[in-house]
Image (cartoon, rainbow, N blue to C red):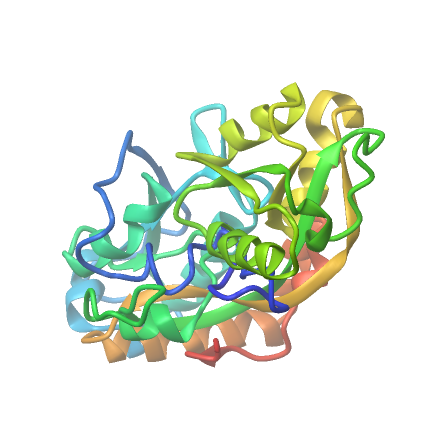
Amino acid sequence: MTASSTRRTTVARTRTAAVGAIAVAGALILTGCGDQTDSGSSTKESSSSSSAPLFDKLPAKIQKAGVIKVGTNAEYAPMEYQEGGKIVGVDPDLAAALSKQLGVEFQFTSGSFDGLISSLNSGRYDVAMSSITDTKARQEGLDENGKKLGPGVDFVDYFTAGTAIYVQKGNPKKIGSIEDLCGQKVAVQHGTTYEQALQKQSTACTKAGKKKLTIEAFDNDTEAQTRVKSGGAVAGVNDYPVAVDIARKADGGNAFEVVGEQVDAGPFGIAVNKDNKELTSALEAAVNAIIEDGTYKKVLDKWGAQTGAIDKAAVNGGK
């Protein structure tokens, strides 16, 4: 799910979550997490000590627990999704690599995307890792109008992704860019930055004397895809690696195609409560460690997500 604000003037960062708005808020706007699915990520060490190289950088509370509780929305292949009752994908595999550096287990729980940050700040999770675009609005807890809704979060950036548009196979409406969506119905996941990007584009359409967009927002990305597949919407908007995965897998590659190029790349970040600076620092060190030892590249290669690779972790690198 990318960052608020479309990568260009129109395409807000991906699912990652509706721009500063929705998910950012940390507190109120987000509804609670829906159905919950738990999936531990790997290497469970001793709850009080570990030989892992970065264990000592963790907060004492997490050292003792031996677990980092992770909130995610496992409906976003190849980044995170459920298979055989287990949460799998790029993010869980990266978390497994991080756990080897930190010496604690990353325990994933799936819930609604737009409730992740509020659940994080309420203490339900230690972090949120779900293709969340790092934006200034989310860092500061602001909605799309700049209104303060919550404390915000810190991000440890570990990946980058741009925005892509996917349409029915054959592209019957000849969509080539977001500007071509004026006057059309477009499906998105609610609470994503795409939703806000489309709202901005709709305004741009009317200012240009064209018809506004009709935005159909759904609770999960699968519903948005179904809407496009049925012809109820002419296009869907998603993170580039996710859109490519959808086009490659759905109906054996016969349902969708990606149109145009990846645009407006922005960082995905692991969200951490602003009061937990020690955990933020430990995660930053762990991301850099798996980049340096080559594990990071192996995970991205496995999932065909090489285009999202970064050279170094950053804290709050989003704009």
The image shows residue 54, relative to residue 259, as above or below, that is below
Position of residue 255 measured from the top left corner of the image (x, y, whole percent): 74, 25
Q: Residue at x 22, y 55 (%)?
A: 118
Residue 248 visible in rendering:
yes
Pick whichever, 264 or 44, lies toward us. 264
Q: Quadrant of residue 254?
A: top right
On screen, residue 211 versus residue 257, left or right, reads left
- In the image shown, does 21 or 90 lie closer to the viewer? 21
Query: Residue 277, percent across and down?
Result: 25, 79
- Residue 35 occupies quadrant: top left
**Residue occupying image coordinates x 37% and y 65%:** 20
Q: Residue at point 67% right, 43% down?
A: 243
Q: Is residue 107 visible?
A: no
Residue nearest the viewer, comparing 234 with 211: 211
- In the image, is residue 78 above or below residue 266? above
Where is residue 59? Give x, y as percent: 21, 73
Q: Residue 270 at x, y = what percent?
A: 40, 64
- Number of dots carrying numbers: 0
